[in-house]
């Protein structure tokens, strides 16, 4: 029997996972949450419905924003931080990936995986069907491939960046500007831009665009039309969104197929 005492819920409850078993646990964080370094006897995937989840290792901060799926192998020390108004699903499994099994990794998300996780977003499947859905989710998730487009920072993040990332991950949209957010951090626009370049080797604009595009992919996987996605993400037109999405896919060497 495997025991879990971690950041899966704010009350720090004990949970168990039987050998060769799997569980899906969805947790809502209305306020900021963090926990100390720990490890688990089993592997788990973290899917972000809303908000931001941050995994810290000795050397890196690994950010997951809406639509991201992060894999944490068993017996891997990590610290976790969850920003406000986040909704996460944890797929805990005793099945260990054969490839990349010793590293925390971001995984691509197929439409079926996104739709299966969506079953737990606000509720959960009927009890008589839940085990079957979980088994399908495990099978499909294990077929996902690692992604090179992870959002990784050097060391532990400067706290001034957290409120910027908090706003960006809770309401991703193309109109969010760093000047609008600077006032809430106590830092100047120049300082924030320097911090993004220092920690991520990327500008705020690049980070914003990635978060927005990841959200776009999440909405597509859930079946939303391109027109509705463009409106949700505050693009000026469908053509502007389509161009941005195709450019995003081109950078990641993926085929851009927009839903009608």
Image (cartoon, grey):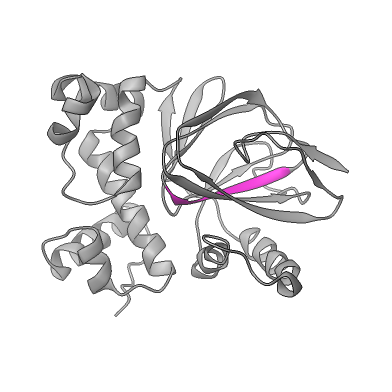
Residue 118, placed above or below residue 149? below
Quadrant showing the C terminus: bottom left
Residue located 84% across and 54% down the image = 20
Judging depth in this view, the residue of 127 and 52 nearest the camera is: 127
Q: Percent position (x, y) of residue 228?
A: 26, 71
Position of 159 with respect to 179 (left or right) is right
Residue located 26% across and 47% down the image = 209
Residue 136, placed above or below residue 199? below
Q: Main secondary structure of the magenta part?
A: strand
Judging depth in this view, the residue of 141 and 91 nearest the camera is: 91
Is residue 148 at all visible to an observer of this figure?
Answer: no
Residue located 68% across and 70% down the image = 133
Position of 121 with respect to 73 (left or right) is left
Residue 161 in magenta stretch: no
Quadrant showing the N terminus: top right
The residue segment tinted magenta is 43-50
Q: Percent position (x, y) of residue 251?
A: 31, 52
């Amino acid at each position: 029997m495997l025991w879990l005492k971690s950041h899966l819920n704010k009350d720090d409850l004990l949970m168990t996972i039987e050998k060769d078993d799997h569980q899906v646990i969805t947790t809502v964080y209305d306020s900021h949450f963090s926990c100390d370094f720990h490890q688990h006897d089993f592997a788990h995937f973290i899917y972000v419905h809303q908000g931001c989840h941050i995994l810290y290792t000795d050397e890196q901060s690994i950010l997951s924003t809406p639509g991201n799926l992060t894999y944490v192998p068993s017996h891997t020390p990590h610290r976790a931080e969850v920003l406000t108004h986040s909704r996460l699903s944890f797929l805990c499994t005793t099945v260990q990936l054969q490839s990349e099994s010793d590293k925390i990794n971001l995984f691509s998300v197929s439409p079926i995986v996104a739709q299966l996780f969506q079953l737990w977003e606000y509720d959960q499947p009927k009890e008589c069907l839940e085990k079957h859905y979980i088994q399908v989710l495990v099978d499909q998730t294990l077929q996902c491939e690692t992604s090179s487009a992870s959002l990784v920072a050097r060391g532990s993040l400067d706290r001034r960046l957290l409120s910027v990332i908090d706003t960006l991950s809770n309401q991703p949209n193309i109109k969010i500007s760093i000047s609008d957010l600077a006032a809430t951090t106590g830092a100047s626009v120049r300082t924030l831009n320097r911090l993004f370049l220092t920690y991520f080797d990327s500008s705020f604009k690049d980070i914003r665009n990635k978060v927005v595009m990841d959200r776009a992919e999440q909405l597509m996987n859930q079946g939303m039309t391109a027109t509705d996605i463009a409106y949700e993400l505050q693009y000026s037109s469908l053509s502007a969104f389509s161009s941005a999405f195709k450019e995003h896919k081109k950078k990641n060497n993926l085929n851009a197929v927009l839903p009608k």
